Image: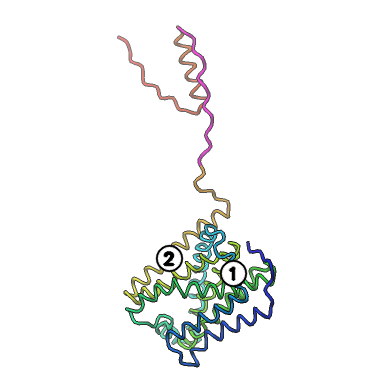
């Protein structure tokens, strides 16, 4: 679990969060271009956060990789299932209030609004830039900073808080999906919570959340670069892996043991034989087989004519 050393000052935390949100939404008010815009959205807040809390984030980033891998995919799988079920329930309610909601959800995802050829580049960017930067900012700083200030306590409500911050950073979905934006917001919130839980229960590991985040975004761009069907299949395969990890993890937590060999009972030695006494030998063999829980397999004796 997460352990804090020197708590992050609240003033620096608030300033860091403000810088993150200012950088995220500045391109919506100022025309910056794609290259400069990405530098502002990701480069500026990463630089500022690194000054405030970077050493603490990086100190734990590669900690407990195997634990983080197992729990990370388990949390991702479990929270994705919860997200899907919650989204279905929410969609029914939204349709009652706004029958046009299904049409709103058919609009293109603004985060995937790129040309098919450039989508291949964005697959690499998902692993090299987007995943690392967003996990560094929202899991490492937004959540890790809260844990630092609370000295590692209250991880659950703080994970909910950081998940909401991650969701609010994508509030531009409301401009595209309007009333139906609740659906992608549920997905974002559950994903952010899964990554926060992974971070806490691995002691601050950031590499695995970066990997999962990169894979998740890459499957979306794969659907743009190829076909929507291939994108859905790849996203479904990722979710399937997560659900498999979740089932294994929670069954293990429930006490189910996997791959434990059966206990072998020691074999009793064969009693000593008495020379020239066939009846004693047969009794000796029978006693030995019973003692070792073996069934007797005796061939029928041939009758002598």
Q: Residue 257 vs residue 295: left or right?
A: right
Q: Secondary structure at mark 2?
A: helix
Image quadrant in which the N terminus is located: bottom right
- Which x, y percent locates residue 80? 49, 69
Question: Which residue, as the protein is rendered here, is positioned at the far top?
Answer: 276
Q: Is residue 193 above or below residue 66?
A: below
Q: Position of residue 204 (x, y in %)?
A: 59, 65
Residue at 60%, 84% (x, y): give it: 18
Q: Which residue is mark 2?
A: 238
Coloring scheme used: rainbow
Tell me if mark 1 has few (under 14), some (14-19) or many (20+) residues whose alpha carbon lies within 10 angstroms of its own: many
Vertical position of residue 117 compared to residue 249: above or below: below
Which of the two discs, 1 and 2, sits closer to the camera? 1
Q: Mark 1: which secondary structure?
A: helix
Q: Considering depth in this image, is 36 or 72 the residue closer to the camera?
A: 36
Gap between marks 1 and 2, in whole Å? 27 Å
Residue on which the image places disc 1: 57
Q: Position of residue 181 (x, y in %)?
A: 49, 83
Residues 189 and 117: in front is 117
Residue 141 falls inside the magenta stretch? no
Pick the residue in front: 275 or 144.
144
Quadrant where the C terminus lies? top left
| Residue 79, disc | none
Which span is picked out in magenta?
Answer: 261-275
N-terminal label among 1 and 2: 1
* Magenta region, main secondary structure: loop
Check if mark 1's residue and mark 2's residue have beta carbons within 8 Å.
Answer: no
Question: What residue is at 66 percent from the left and 79 percent from the top?
Answer: 12
Please give left or right for residue 130 compared with residue 168 in the image: left
Counting other residues with Cα less than 10 Å from the Cα at mark 2, is it few (<14), some (14-19), or many (20 or more)? some
């Amino acid at each position: 679990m997460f352990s804090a050393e020197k708590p992050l000052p609240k003033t620096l935390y608030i300033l860091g969060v403000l810088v993150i949100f200012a950088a995220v939404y500045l391109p919506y008010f100022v025309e910056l271009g794609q290259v400069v815009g990405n530098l502002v959205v990701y480069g500026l807040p990463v630089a500022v956060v690194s000054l405030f809390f970077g050493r603490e984030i990086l100190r734990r980033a590669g900690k407990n990789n195997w634990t983080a891998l197992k729990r990370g995919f388990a949390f991702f799988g479990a929270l994705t299932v919860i997200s899907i079920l919650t989204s279905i329930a929410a969609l029914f309610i939204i349709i009652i209030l706004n029958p046009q909601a299904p049409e709103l959800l058919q609009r293109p995802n603004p985060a995937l609004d790129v040309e098919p050829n450039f989508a291949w580049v964005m697959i690499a960017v998902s692993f090299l830039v987007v995943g690392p930067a967003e996990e560094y900012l929202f899991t490492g700083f937004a959540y890790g900073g809260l844990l630092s200030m609370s000295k590692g306590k209250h991880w659950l409500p703080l994970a909910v808080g950081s998940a909401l911050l991650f969701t609010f950073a994508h509030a531009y979905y409301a401009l595209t999906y309007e009333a139906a934006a609740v659906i992608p917001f549920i997905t974002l919130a559950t994903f952010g919570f899964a990554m926060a839980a992974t971070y806490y229960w691995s002691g601050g590991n950031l590499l695995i959340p970066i990997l999962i985040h990169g894979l998740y975004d890459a499957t979306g761009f794969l659907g743009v670069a190829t076909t929507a069907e291939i994108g859905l299949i790849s996203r479904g395969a990722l979710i399937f892996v997560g659900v498999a990890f979740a089932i294994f993890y929670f069954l293990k937590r429930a006490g189910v043991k996997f791959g434990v060999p059966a206990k072998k009972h020691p074999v009793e030695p064969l009693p000593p034989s008495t020379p020239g006494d066939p009846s004693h030998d047969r009794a000796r063999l029978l006693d030995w087989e019973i003692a070792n829980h073996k069934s007797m397999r005796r061939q029928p004796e041939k009758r002598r004519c």
